[in-house]
Image: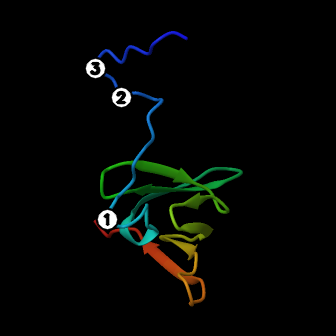
Amino acid sequence: MPKYLDKGRKDPFTEVQLSATTGGLSVATTKLTGIVRGPRSVLALLETQEGIGYILKPGDTLGDGRLMEIGADSVVFAVGPKAGSAAQRVVLRLAAN
């Protein structure tokens, strides 16, 4: 089997570690940076604290939540329940510039 030569690049074959302190990506720590409306779809642009961007449509999952709806200036996630509690809604709003 040939050996991968990274040549200074990130090795795509290593396991990605999210955040060791939080146990993974949390919707509550992301920010909504934009909403794109097309003729057939609406997409939400989100960014993590590390600066990693995500493009989501309703039904997509991100970390501990599932995107339920995209409004005019906000998105609504259903966040999975913690042990002994019900699922909760998390609303992220576009920052007013």
Residue under label 3, please give it.
8
- Return the residue found at the far top: 2
Q: Is residue 33 above or below residue 2?
A: below
Q: Are marks 1 and 3 in contact (CB under 8 Å)?
A: no
Q: Is residue 28 above or below residue 15?
A: below
- Return the residue found at the far front: 1
Q: Which residue is drawn at 58% across and 75% down?
A: 80
Q: Which amino acid does label 3 sit on?
A: Gly
Dot 2, crowdedness within 10 Å: few (<14), some or many (≥20)?
few
Q: How is the image coloured?
A: rainbow
Q: Which amino acid does label 1 sit on?
A: Thr
From the viewer's side, name the closer residue of 58 and 27.
Answer: 27
Q: x and y percent of residue 53 in the render? A: 41, 49
Whole-angstrom CA distance, mark 1 to mark 3, is 27 Å
From the viewer's side, name the closer residue of 83 and 65.
Answer: 83
Q: x and y percent of residue 49 in the render? A: 31, 58
Q: x and y percent of residue 73 in the render? A: 47, 70
Q: Is residue 19 above or below residue 75?
A: above
The numbered mark, 1 or 3, whose residue comes first in the sequence reads 3
Total residue callouts: 3
Q: Which residue is drawn at 60% across and 67% down?
A: 66
- Helix, strand or loop under label 3: loop
Residue under label 1, please give it.
21
Dot 3, crowdedness within 10 Å: few (<14), some or many (≥20)?
few
Image-based side of 45 in relation to 66, left or right:
left
Whole-angstrom CA distance, mark 2 to mark 1, is 22 Å
- Helix, strand or loop under label 1: loop
Label annotation for residue 10? 2
- Helix, strand or loop under label 2: loop
Whole-angstrom CA distance, mark 3 to mark 2, is 7 Å
Q: Which amino acid does label 2 sit on?
A: Lys
